[in-house]
Image: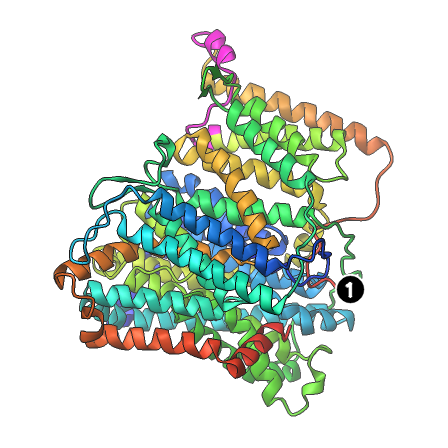
Amino acid sequence: MSERSGDDGSGRALTPLSQNVAAGLGLVLLGLFGVWASADLPRGTLGAMGPGMLPHWVAIGVAACGAVLAATGLVRGGAGLQAVGLRGPVVVVLAILAFAATIRPTALGPVTTPGLGLMVAGPLTVILAGYASPEARFRELLILALLLTAGCMLLFGDLLNLPIPLFPTALVEAASGRIPSRVLLRLAAGALALTGLGLLLLQRRSARRGGTDVARHSMTA
Amino acid sequence: MPDLLSHLGLGFAVALSLQNLLLCFLGCLVGTLIGVLPGVGPIATIAMLLPITFGLDPVGALIMLAGIYYGAQYGGSTTAILVNIPGEATSVVTTLDGHQMARQGRAGIALGTAAIASFFAGTVATLLIAALGAPLTRLALIFGPAEYFALMVMGLAFAVVLAHGSVLKAVAMILVGILFACIGTDLETGEERMTFGLTFLTDGIDFSVLAMGLFGVAEILRNLDQTETRDIARARIGRLLPSLADLRQAMPATLRGTAIGASLGILPGNGAVLGPFAAYTVEKRIARDPGRFGRGAIEGVAGPESANNAGAQTAFIPLLTLGIPPNAVMALMVGAMTIHGIVPGPGVMTKNPNLFWGMIASMWIGNLMLLVINLPLVGIWVRLLKVPYRLMFPAILMFCSIGIYSISSLPTDVMLIAAFGVFGYALIKFGFEPAPLLLGFVLGKLMEEYLRRALTLSRGDAMVFLERPVSAVLFLVAFTILALALLPSLRRSRDEVFTEA
């Protein structure tokens, strides 16, 4: 459900290279890559299509579309490339990777990431992600992270029983046999929530900010 | 007719069970919430909530997911009217006259008109699904693989024509989607395709991973590019119920909007998106004084809003009867059905009548609930709009990660949403629309299967598609609309419909 951003006027032309030429060349590369990747698959005949038949022809189609797009772009020109912010994509990707790496022990080649569970991976993701926006404020993000994690632990772990690791593996091992896991879950979520609420109250005491900001949309007049 | 009544009776018996009522309410509530909040769409939300429905029974799960979808259409108009920002892509046109009405102090009337028009359209569309369900299912049973393939080609052709912007770019996106669908183990030969020996690609790319990346993460990246201070309609909302004169003015527009939206919604290929645009254009064309439009004409709210909601509901028809998802949200519903072991298609009605009729009945109940959720509670939704985006997106990201992780407990899936997020962001920056890609991805697997079957049956004779009359007609329609879309004169009027807003 995305609105096209090509015409919201926020993008400046960076290079004389038009959007369509670049997009077309990208498609050609993608198509060629597809042709190469499916080259070793038997194509078979129309009567008995092999696994390589469809990918091969579709990849050629992608490349052909790209070629036409690039050609028309060269002839007619068109909108220039849009400015791209680096901070957003880089930080958001880092935040997602942080979640993936810490949620459970994963072997990445020779290194095994620590399995820290949702209790750590959650706040880590939220706080990291927050810095994708230049308006990030640490304390605000910390409160959000604590409250959200507590809520998610209760919702996904306690209520819905989803198979998601909640605690660091070391903690689970230490607690096993001593505390029932459900009690541990509620205790931990309660502690997170209380800390979050406490911080929130402290912040409320200090000055309140004004003005609200939400994503701009092409329809904002 | 008595058949229809007994079916609907069964449906209401299912939908009115306490659990299903609650799930329906929950779905509508969540739907309204994400509809109101710009930047969170139904696609990402349903993908996020998919794992939650694992534990539910399939009827309840689908009732809830459907509620999210049409609830979002309701909620989107609230934001459009009060803040001049469409909460959903389909409520873009509502901003035109809806927000003007709000500026004139008639915000409540605009909200009320939108809700009543939506409710009316939803009711009509529900009846239409119930009435068309049985005959279309019978039609589907005589379809062979060649016809199914032709039908999907026609669906994709419509998706191309109805997509915003360049036709060529939309075609390219569909092809890329089909190419992505090829990744993974080939169903028929068991050979791995384009996996490069990576184990997490063996089963192919999970649909929700792709959807979450392209629509959840990429949207966040796009929104982060711009910051904005937004002024939430300071004006009073005023009274909500339109007067008799207002109603009389809005009624014909509602009727027309419902008809337009419902018929576009049935089209395979996301016709529902076009509904509001078409309805607005029609209202403006036939109005005695077109100058009133854009200055708070009540028809400009009633028409698109009813078209929007009617289309959102009739979009279920191709899914429930033919098993072909007409848009990305419906594709997610396919995913939800498959998880519960239900094969979408003509078999649903005979094998799972509870599900089929229960879902239809729940839509009407849901529409009634939405009326209650939206009108009296509008104050709460407005307050929600004050949540700044810088706090909203980290939360969305966390929900996305948790949701994707719990589908198959694979951290690689979580990493993939980051990759597809960046890919989707690049697509947006290059002027591509990601929606056709997703549709191509979903239909790609089905298409290959039917193409293979059809060609095997005909022993490799590609003429089979033109020799069978039904498939020949479908192909003809597909090529005609594609050719028409490329004609300069029609292209201009197509652009006009989209840029009308």
Q: Position of residue B425 (x, y in %)?
A: 58, 48
Query: What is the tally of numbered marks visible in this picture?
Result: 1
Q: In this view of the protein, can residue B16 be seen by the observer? A: no
- Chain ID of residue with mark 1: B
Q: How is the image coloured?
A: rainbow
Quadrant for the C terminus of chain B, please: bottom right
| Residue under the image location 25 percent in, 75 percent down | B472
Q: Position of residue B492 (x, y in %)?
A: 57, 79
Q: Which residues are magenta?
A: A157-178
Out of A207 and B286, give the one closest to the viewer: B286
Does dot 1 land on a helix, a strand or a loop? loop
Quarter-of-image position of residue B397 = top right
Q: Residue furthest right?
A: A207
User: Does residue B130 show up magenta in the picture?
Assistant: no
Q: Position of residue B219 (x, y in %)?
A: 59, 49
Up-down: is A40 above or below A158? below
Up-down: is B385 above or below B162? above
Please give the residue where the numbered disc 1 appears in the rendered image: B236
Q: Position of residue B394 (x, y in %)?
A: 63, 38
User: In the figure, is residue B95 to the left or right of B434?
Assistant: right
Instruction: Give the residue type at disc 1.
Output: Arg
Quarter-of-image position of residue B206 = top left
User: In the figure, is residue B345 to the left or right of B76?
Assistant: left
| Residue under the image location 59 percent in, 89 percent down | B286
Quadrant for the N terminus of chain B, please: bottom left
| Residue under the image location 62 percent in, 26 percent down | A124
Up-down: is A153 above or below B485? above
Out of B393 and A25, give the one closest to the viewer: A25
Q: In this view of the protein, can residue B412 be seen by the observer? A: yes
Out of A21 and B101, give the one closest to the viewer: A21
